[in-house]
Amino acid sequence: MRRVSIFGATGSVGTSTLDLIGRDRDGYQVVALTAHRDVAALAAAARQHDAKLAVIGDEALYTDLRDALSGTDIEVAAGPAALVEAARRDVDWTMAAIVGCAGLEPTLAALEGGRTIALANKESLVSAGSLMMEAAHASGATLLPVDSEHNAIFQCLAGGRLAEVRKITLTASGGPFRTLSQEAMRAVTPAQAVKHPNWSMGAKISVDSATMMNKGLEFIEAAHLFPVGLDRIEILVHPQSVIHSMVEFRDCSTLAQLGSPDMRIPIAHALAWPERIATPCAPLDLAAIGRLDFEAPDEARFPALRLARQAAEAGGAYPAVLNAANEVAVAAFLAERIGFLEIAMIVEETLTAYSAPAPRRIEDILEADRSARAAAGRILERVQV
Ligand code: NAD
Ligand code: MG
């Protein structure tokens, strides 16, 4: 029996992970499951998977969760400190699938424990990548990328060493507005933005895919996971999302990983690694797909790509500021307080206004995150509709 914990268990990645684990009840013992506010879904998952511990991120919901789990022997806890405590429990495998920088402290705590972490929570790596990679090296933790592109690159790197890499190509679907002019993007609604052509995902990452900030965040994520240098990481738009990413080696041989756009495939890879398990996913049918298309990304229509690259080049706390401003702006867009084009505008203004010495400790990152949220909030007051 492998002991597993799932952070963000009620989300898109979390439920896909539970779906896989639930198919092999004798193979796994679920230790901790966590969620932010969805008490009913968390309690149902904890009962169904016989979890030892359920943690709700919102402290005010402690009694609700306790009541929902009364009559069971499932331990109940609430609040950010309880999430970190849960991440320190002894398990074999942890899924980090909280969305946003809220996942940083629990993910870091899990990494410090020196075990195997499957990482979906890209925002934590964007904000604090250097500190997280240092923590993983110091503790001997195994960090397995779940983001489909990074999981693809990880798989391709079985075919050569990092030092032999000429180029990493991150593929991007281009999102639902790939062919729209900027003028046409001005009027798009949250409902249109969250309707991704290929993937079914949480609301925040779906909006990130529509602005292409998701690819920008993934560029920074890739730079930490696969340190080949920023100039060796390239973005390629591939609307069908069949090739999940590619690695070109110095002999000009390129390896790619392909599959149906179903997150259970990379999750299963991280769950079973270094072995492979069967999944219920659809096998790839290339004859039915017929063709694969590629195009260069357009930074003029999708300025988030440029902002992420600039933040990565500036280093220090700039990626944390980029991420925090983006989280604030995306939430405001989803709440219909700002238009779609204002997302990148708020991120750019927040980055331009920011300056502080390079972060040395996690507290510095958390402070940069807080001050960027406050700054983005002030810009928001000015531009909101
Ligand atoms: P989601 O919105 O569907 O789920 C997020 C989970 O995090 C939920 O369980 C929620 O309760 C929890 N959560 C949210 N805010 C929290 C907080 N403040 N404190 C504690 N818990 C909180 O998101 P998702 O689509 O599953 O994405 C999760 C992460 O995985 C994100 O970082 C995303 O970028 C990444 N990711 C997702 C996909 C995908 O297909 N959905 C693909 C690649 C990477
Ligand atoms: Mg991805």
Image (cartoon, rainbow, N blue to C red):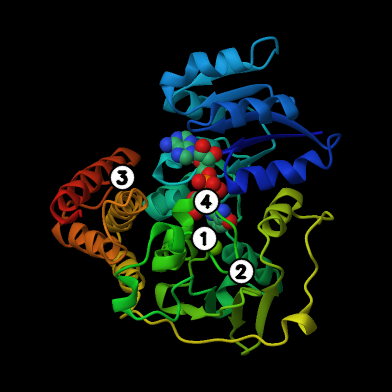
Q: Which residue is denoted by mark 4 in the rendering?
A: 202
Cα–Cα span, label 2 and label 1: 10 Å
Q: Residues within 10 Å of mark 2 (few under 14, many from 20)?
A: many
The kind of residue tagged 3 is Ile
Q: Residues within 10 Å of mark 1 (few under 14, many from 20)?
A: some
Q: Earlier in the sequence, mark 2 or mark 4?
A: 2
SS at mark 2 in the image = helix
- Which residue is farthest bottom? 252
Q: Which residue is denoted by mark 3 in the rendering?
A: 365
User: Residue 89: where, in percent of width, then height?
Assistant: 60, 26
Q: Nearer the viewer, residue 236 or 328?
A: 328
Q: Residue at x 76, y 41 (%)?
A: 21
Q: Which residue is denoted by mark 1 in the rendering?
A: 225
Q: Nearer the viewer, residue 172 or 119?
A: 172
SS at mark 3 in the image = helix
The kind of residue tagged 1 is Leu
Point out the frontmost of discs 2 and 1: 2
Point out the frontmost of discs 2 and 4: 4
Q: Earlier in the sequence, mark 3 or mark 1?
A: 1
Q: Where's the C terminus, which quadrant?
A: bottom left
